[in-house]
Amino acid sequence: MIINNVNFLREVYDNSLVGIIVVDRNLRIAFVNKIVELFTGYSEDELQGMDVFRIAHPEDHEKIMDAYEKGLKGKPLFVELRYLTKDGKTRWVWGFIKPIEVENELFGFGNWVDITHTKELQSKLKESEEFYRTLMELSVAPVVIVQDGVITYVNRSFEEVLGYDRKEVLRENPFEFLIHPDDVPEMVEKYFNLLTRKSSVEEHQFRVFSKSGDVIWAWGRGSLTTIDGKPAVVVTAIDITKLKESDEFHRSLIDEFLAPIHIVQEGKLVYLNQSFVNMLGYRKFELKEKTLASLIHPEDREEVLKKYMEVEHGLRNSEELSFRVVTKEGGYRWLTVRLSRITYSGKPAVASTAVDTTEIHNLTTQLKSKSEYLSLLNKILRHDILNDLTVVRAALELKDEKLMDVALTKIDRISKLIYETKALEKLGDVKKEINLADTVREVAETFKEIANVRLKLEDVSVLANEEIKTVIFNILNNAVKHSGKNPVDIEVETFSDGDWAVLRISDNGKGIPDEIKKKIFEEGFSAGYGTGIGLFLVKKVVEIYGGSVKVADNYPSGAVFEVRLPKVRESRV
């Protein structure tokens, strides 16, 4: 049979990928196949009769002798050994040795597999494991491994920061003794997110208890790994307790800071200090769902939002601007702000430090109005009155009767101009809190003989001076003179509307044509008689008080004048 053919068997041995080596009783090599020649670098002739210790690694000689003794007793065994190649390199083999007897002579028959590559990989893996284990153990950040819901590893930093010995925490459930109860639900959720692979990494700030019972704030990063074939979560953390205490300290400072401060992120108000809240008249919880856009005056909104967006997106590092914000009661306040780009909760945001410049803007408006008043006063004195005096002088010099009548009219006009310019002079007087309803009663009393005046008054206070009476007088006087009725019915109302005090004067006269409505507050406009500065004076006085005046139709006939002045805020307890 072919299997008994020596040449066939030799061919099989030489082409085998497993090394075959046969040694005699004296541990000299009697037979090797080609694969042994290939790995050792020796030829078959060189190996024949060679002492096995010559190619065995010196540190494994004792192991070979132990295997030899067991072989003499007829015991087969598996063994892992090192051997030396012809060029002096060390390689590894793993094999099976079995004693066999041929023609009454005992031999050791071995099948060997070269495992050098595997050994090198194992060595590198072991080195890598040792390296990373050393890194974890010596890390300044606490490291915890949680597997099957219990702690299986903690490093030295964990022990140092929390005061535990690792033996005290191993095999313990961290959610039951270590993590603050308020943080457990979210931490459990993140743990299962990793185990179920909903996320590859989880980050969170949470609190843990030290062995002494102190609360320690930690920022942790968890990731999923595999240990011994099972999933585990590795958590690396840093102690942020001091940072948290500092953050709370600075937040408290900012929250109580007198200047209004707010933080905007993606158009939303993510932080407001108390000064900002108080300025707008809200309570903090009422602003929780507000956007920045909803608080900006409509006329300023587009430009202001553009500036905030540019800073948030890094197109500008900082920006300064002034704009109006709308209060809870519907009024507005002027803010001058400085915008700065910051990182808030890990994302870009805009921090704004503001100054309430409402009074400055109002003062600027008043100064501008006063400048206009002074120009008007100068014009009246230098132009109108001087022109009229020229006519009077001519009449006196020429002693013309007709001219005398004109002169008398001019003298009356000069008297009115002097009276009305006196009102302009008084606008510089210090303003004080005035009850608008009381002032209306006082002025309306002077019209009781020439008009039917009905009062509907609510107590409301404004900051003004005596010239508020000029405003009321001129509007009432205008209603009497231009109503076309004798007597005319007039209704005067005062009431509060948000941040405003409202004075409304209505009559049932012939009204004011639309084309004239646009002109009646202009300087010098007159319906045919008078100085032409009465209603112009009304408009200017109201503006210097920070208010506005408008006229509309009354129904079924007549006109309605409405004056709006900033209301004096009631002090809050």
Image: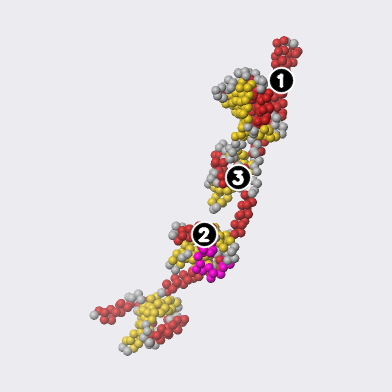
Of badges 1 and 3, the one in the foreground is: 3
Residue 79: mark in rendering: none
* Residues marked 3 and 2 touching at CB (< 8 Å): no
The residue tagged 1 is 414
Q: CA distance from mark 2 to mark 1?
A: 87 Å
Of badges 2 and 1, the one in the foreground is: 2
Residue 179 x/y as whole percent? 54, 61
Residue 277: mark in rendering: 3
Mark closer to the chain start, 1 or 3: 3
**Magenta segment range?**
159-179
* Residues marked 2 and 1 touching at CB (< 8 Å): no
Displayed quadrant of residue 434 = top right
User: Secondary structure beneath disc 3?
Assistant: helix
- Relative to 98, say whether 446 is above or below: above
- Relative to 289, say whether 107 is above or below: below
Q: CA distance from mark 1 to mark 3?
A: 53 Å
What amino acid type is highlighted by mark number 1? Answer: Ile
Q: Is residue 318 left or right of residue 386?
A: left
Residue 202 x/y as whole percent? 49, 58
Residue appearing at x 33%, y 86% in the figure? 101
The residue tagged 2 is 184
Which image quarter holds the N terminus?
bottom left
Residue appearing at x 41%, y 74% in the figure? 115
Q: Residues within 10 Å of mark 3 (few under 14, many from 20)?
A: many
